[in-house]
Image (cartoon, helix red, strand yellow):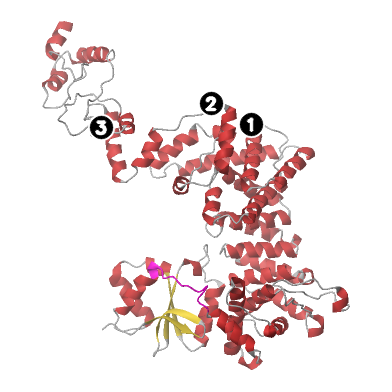
Amino acid sequence: MEAAAASLLGPLPRNTAGGISFPVLSSNNPYHYAQLHHPFSSLLNINLTRCTSRLPPCRVSLKEDDATPQWQLDFLGPDPQPRSDEDDDPLPAESTDWCVRARRSALSSIEARGLSPALERMVSPPKKIKNKKKKKQKKKKILSKKPRKDDELLGEDEVDGDVEEIFSVSDDLDLRVAQLADGVFDEKRQRNREHFIQTLSSFSAAPSNRNKEVSFNRDIVQAQTAEEVLALTAVVIAAVAKGLSPSPLTALNIATALHRIAKNMESVSMMQTHRLAFARHRDMSMLVGLAMLSLPECSPQGISNISWALSKIGGDLLYLPEMDRIANVAISKVEDFNAQNVANIAGAFASMRQSAPDLFSALAQRAAQLVHTFKEQELAQFLWGCASLNECPYPLLDALDAAFQDATSFKCHVDMSQSGAKEVSSEEYGSNSHALNFSRDQLGNIAWSYAVLGQLDRQFFSHIWRTLCQYEEQRVSDQYREDIMFSSQVYLANQSLKLEYPHLDMGLRGDLEEKISKAVKSKRFNQKTTSLFQKDVGRLLYTTGHEWVREFTVDGYTVDAALVDEKLALEIDGTTHFSRNLGTPLGHTSFKRRYITTAGWKLVPLSHQEWEELQGESEQMKYLRRILGIDAE
């Protein structure tokens, strides 16, 4: 029987390296035909398998210039066919092995999509460090390093530690497959992480150890950098995951850790790109997830600290669902908030462009109850937050008018020699306990807020504005950014007073208006950039046959394009003009539209979202003509 099989096979070919290899089995190959139709094909297969199992793996003899990268050879596996020196294709040929064919097909698809670098990193992983001490040193080193471009692109950190070991089996495999499968396993990995966080929360519900909690809190507060705080928290999270009980991960400590991370970032003026890369660290994601679970147990100060911290770490690019959860929890606890909590939460949502109508309505009601407890900075911050999101706090405005009905009950002192306000004794104000001591910037913020909200006829604003006029004798320079910001706010409020409330006769007089106008028109801090969106729309506008004027100024406001004779203005609004979750116009956008309309112009807004939904230039041109009321020629 074996002799018959040997006669069918004939002499075995040898490759250039001297080893035995087998030809490709195909329909045109006599060996393939013999295997399919010979009655001893089953025995032939067995003998072939037995023979080949004793042979060393085959390798292709290649020219050095045409050598295939080692990572591709590792991915495809051994070559089942001998190759000649004249063959240009160094990769393994097709075979009956379905796994080899699948890998070849996958490699071609990956190369076509430009994902070869990612595959190379996965096929050739870095060597693991067995020594636990070296792992901890590597973790500290990675946390202290600046984020690399690869980290920003892939969104994955390389921190090794105890928490990494928990996910080392399933999470690493899911990550690699997800990169090849275009994120198929992202949802599964997120569920695993949520399950892990739920497990941590169940451990933290055990009886507490006050000494451990206080010690952990002290370590967090004493940490000098955001990386140190995160490293301390990661160690505790890993210990709790392994069964540490009682857990020091209380709601207070979690909120404190987030707050200290953000505060340390602010202290060193960390760049936004570095903050976003930091936020993508796995340990940071765990900490934020724990904070969301502990929100119902947090005090009002804890909720305030968490919201402020997320706004500083993620800006207006991250933590959208987290802020929605904060809004829901804050509404349920708003009656326990003090003035500082109200101001900080409003400021956090405003800086992140996160609309929350129900939350701001509840905050306005609470602020009205606390009107006499507000400090100057807190009042200015809350009004600015409401104006930024275009949420008018009517209850608070009414309470301010009632609390300060006349000038004798409203005292403001501005230090002319410094940008901030100086402390004023109670004797200087007399017996009035509600005297306010505003800085120049705070007055500018309040004036701008009232202008945006369209509430310049309020009693409280009249006192603010008269106090602001005390700067008539002070020089407002056009060389400093602080002066430019203050001047811009005052300039817009003054223009709104003259245009929308001329009957109040409260416009600036004398040299102050001239100085502020000069500072606002300075080109030092007013360099404008034109986006691709504006360029695309501008190019189509010129094809309409009308004489459009770009960047036309209307009483201090600049519109993107205008037909001056028809008093028709087109505003091309990008994503920064709208809230990121609801898409509603922000306060400064609504104010600009209202102002230009009041000035007698027909304003047509065009949002980036509307433009992206249009298909092709033909449809875009039809849409432009329709919204502008221009007949097609």
Q: Amino acid at mark 2?
A: Lys
Mark 3 is surrounded, within 10 Å at the Cα level, by few (under 14), some (14 to 19) or many (20 or more) other residues, namely: few
Residue that numbered label 3 is attached to: 67
- Quadrant, the C terminus: bottom left
Q: Amino acid at mark 1?
A: Lys
Report whether 12 appears left or right of 594.
Answer: left
Residue that numbered label 2 is attached to: 130
Between 198 and 444, the one nearer to me in the picture:
444
Q: Main secondary structure of the magenta part?
A: loop
Q: Amino acid at mark 3?
A: Ala
Distance CA(mark 3)–CA(mark 2): 33 Å
Between 450 and 61, the one nearer to me in the picture:
61
- Quadrant, the N terminus: top left
Residue 499, image x and y in percent? 57, 89
Q: Secondary structure at mark 1?
A: loop
Residue that numbered label 1 is attached to: 242
Between 599 and 15, the one nearer to me in the picture:
15
Q: Is residue 507 visible?
A: no
Among numbered discs 2 and 1, the one appearing first in the sequence: 2
Mark 2 is surrounded, within 10 Å at the Cα level, by few (under 14), some (14 to 19) or many (20 or more) other residues, namely: few
Q: Secondary structure at mark 2?
A: loop
